[in-house]
Amino acid sequence: MSNLKEELKTKIIEQLNLEDITVGDIADDDSLFGDGLGLDSIDALELIVMLDKDYGIKLSDPKEGRKIFESIETMANYIASHRTK
Amino acid sequence: MKTNFHIESYCSIKENKVILNGDLIVKIDVKTYSEFIKHAYKAIDIKYPKFFKMDNLSKLAFVAAEVLLGKEPTNENKNIAIVFSNKASSLDTDRMHQETINSPEYYYPSPAIFVYTLPNICMGEISIKHKLLTENSFFIFNHFNAYYLHAYTNSLLQNKKTEKVLCGWINYDGEDYEAFVYLVSQKGYWQHTTEEITRLYTI
């Protein structure tokens, strides 16, 4: 699980172009949106695409994303139990 | 043709250089556009993390606008229309988007790329940063067209649609990039004429 969390942090930094942020700057329970990493609605769509492309998870209801994308911790838990690749 | 309008300031960005009113303010010897524009962003001391999410065309327009409009939104800046033009439209980003949808088996369009598949998005980025609610237009020409920009800008000012116009040429295609942007208003050192616009563009 810790490997998956590190992998997610790396992917988020690279794919969402988070300048001057390193893996070490993101705590597992940091909020990804709002006051945390400050991701926006386009970033949320990118994360949905990433779940599909990299882990074979299709979110049928985008509202599900709110809980899944709360933090690295919640993302990793969801991916670990739903991934198809 | 002479008018009562003037060019307050102008900015040129090309060949790894940023020039403001004829003065070189940024120069760096790098091989890629991405290295150059990141260096220019830092050299001009812009603090705007969303910059790094923009496409190449928007980054070019954004840096040019920052050089002319300053770092913070001010009341004086709020009534500025934007009139930009270029040759390549958003072709660079269009190609990136196409790459994400080429294969039916690997069809993953990126929302972050797709939102920049129009050239006028770069004006939106500038408007958001400077809280501009004014008119904006983006034209596609084969070459820099001082006559059209001059006429359109004069029309906006004469009809009191705006107090100032940020206008010019923002072109990005592959590693080929060029920006020439100038601010037109009632006052300024240079006359707002097609001859003067062309002269400043070709310096």
Image: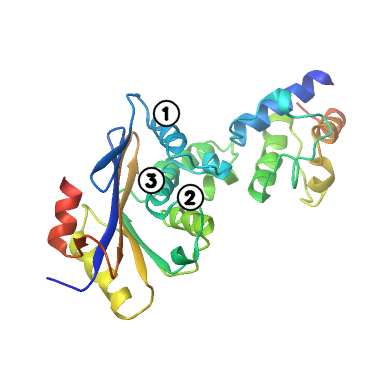
Q: Indicate which disc, 2 or 3, sits on the residue closer to the N terminus.
A: 2
Location of residue A59 by image quarter:
top right
Can you say whether B157 is above or below A65 in the image? below
Residue B38 x/y as whole percent: 45, 33
Can residue A24 be seen here?
yes
Residue B163 x/y as whole percent: 37, 72
Location of residue A14 by image quarter:
top right
For label 2, the residue is B71
For the residue marked with disc 3, what is the amino acid?
Answer: Leu
For label 1, the residue is B35
Residue for point 52% across, 43% down: B51
Residue A42 x/y as whole percent: 63, 48
For the residue marked with disc 1, what is the amino acid?
Answer: Glu
The chain identifier of the residue carrying mark 1 reads: B
Q: How far is disc 2 from disc 3 in space, using C-alphas?
A: 29 Å
Q: Are marks 2 and 3 in contact (CB under 8 Å)?
A: no
Q: Is residue B102 left or right of residue A34?
A: left
The residue lying toward the viewer, choosing from B184 and B152, is B184
Q: Which residue extends farthest bottom?
A: B159
Badge number at residue B91: 3
